[in-house]
Image (cartoon, rainbow, N blue to C red):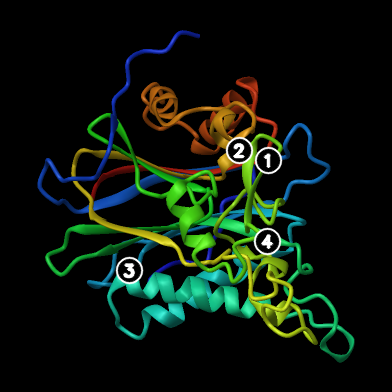
Amino acid sequence: MALAQQSVARVGSRRSVRVRASTEVQAPPARVVVKAHGAYTVKGTVRKINEDRFDVKVAAPGAAGEPFVWAGVYDGHGGFATAEWLQKRLFGVVEKEWAAGYKPEYTITEAYLAADKALLSMGAGFMGMGERGVGGAKCGATAATTLLFPAADGTTQLLAANCGDARVVLVRGGAAVQISEDHVPDREAERRRIEGMNPNPKLPLVRYVGGTWRVGGLLALSRAFGDAYLKSSLQFEGMPAGSDGYSSGFGVIAEPYTHLTQLTAEDSWLVVASDGLYAEEERGGGGGLDNAGLVELLSSVAPGADLNKVAETLASAAVALGSTDDVTLVVMRLGPA
């Protein structure tokens, strides 16, 4: 890949802002690059440690199909080990899968699944009876990633993927377009998917606890990396699968939502962030920005502004609005090559 191995250091009234439902292209595809980028992460106000991680790699565009931008945000829970593993290794897994030459959305899906398999295969204890998974059986992470690469005609394509509730937002024509999908058990489709795997309907896999739906009554996510205790019978050595109604797994998977789109001259910003940036009152969580509020703040950013400082300002705005979770985001200003 053409990407340089670099990382970004951690460093009133609302106007009417449009939010688009899709990335349906209004303007013709264009050759778009990242003009500037920045990132910021901060520990949540009620957290003992910051469990979030991120990584960013930006290079000049190269050959067709060769990625030149990568950005990922990894929101850990039950510790930071899974998020840190993804920060250090997920891009390498993507590189390996990308080299096989398959379609982009298939490739990123295979990379996510391969990474999760590697995460779950580590950490077995004495006689295979110990906790599996990096950081232990209850350590996990959500992820949102973006990858830019040139198409054969020289225009730029954006591949977004996410697993869990970390989010990718593209600003197109002054409107927010969410190109990720929140994987939470509050969504009926996700609850149906999980319960469809339940070998014992008398023991629901998803229960309403603490103001939100939770898998196993514990995890307020339906997809995540790690979390070995909620995945398959591999985490229950010595116990026949399904004998307790749960040991065959709780339906938590790492299969990502993927979105491939052509960038246009209307595209001005790309933001990858953990859910701590956003309001979650409907899920029993804290306050924060919504997609429209994010666009409103970005619209006032001056040309040439330090985007590390911009990312910090956005995180601070989320905290001021009531976010108590760790907040991590990568901000990229887009423009014509």
Q: Quick one: 45 or 188, which is closer to the camera?
A: 188
- Mark 2 lies on a secondary structure that is helix
The CA distance from mark 4 to mark 2 is: 16 Å
Given the image, on which type of amino acid does mark 4 rest? Gly
**Residue behind mark 2:** 276
Where residue 275 appears, as percent x and y from the top left, is 56, 41
Q: Give neighbour class at mark 4: few <14, some 14-19, many 20+ (Cα, 10 Å).
A: many
The CA distance from mark 3 to mark 4 is: 23 Å
Say whether disc 3 or disc 4 marks the residue closer to the N-terminus: 3
**Residue behind mark 4:** 140
- Mark 4 lies on a secondary structure that is strand
Given the image, on which type of amino acid does mark 2 rest? Gly
Q: Quick one: 244 or 309, which is closer to the camera?
A: 244
The CA distance from mark 3 to mark 1 is: 29 Å
Nearer to us: label 4 or label 2: 4
In the image, taking residue 153 as reference, residue 254 lies left or right, namely right
**Residue behind mark 1:** 326
Where residue 99 appears, as percent x and y from the top left, is 37, 83
**Residue behind mark 3:** 105
In the image, taking residue 181 as reference, residue 21 lies left or right, namely left
Say whether disc 2 or disc 1 marks the residue closer to the N-terminus: 2
- Residue found at the very far bottom of the displayed protein: 127
- Please report contact status of discs 2 and 1: CB closer than 8 Å, yes or no: yes
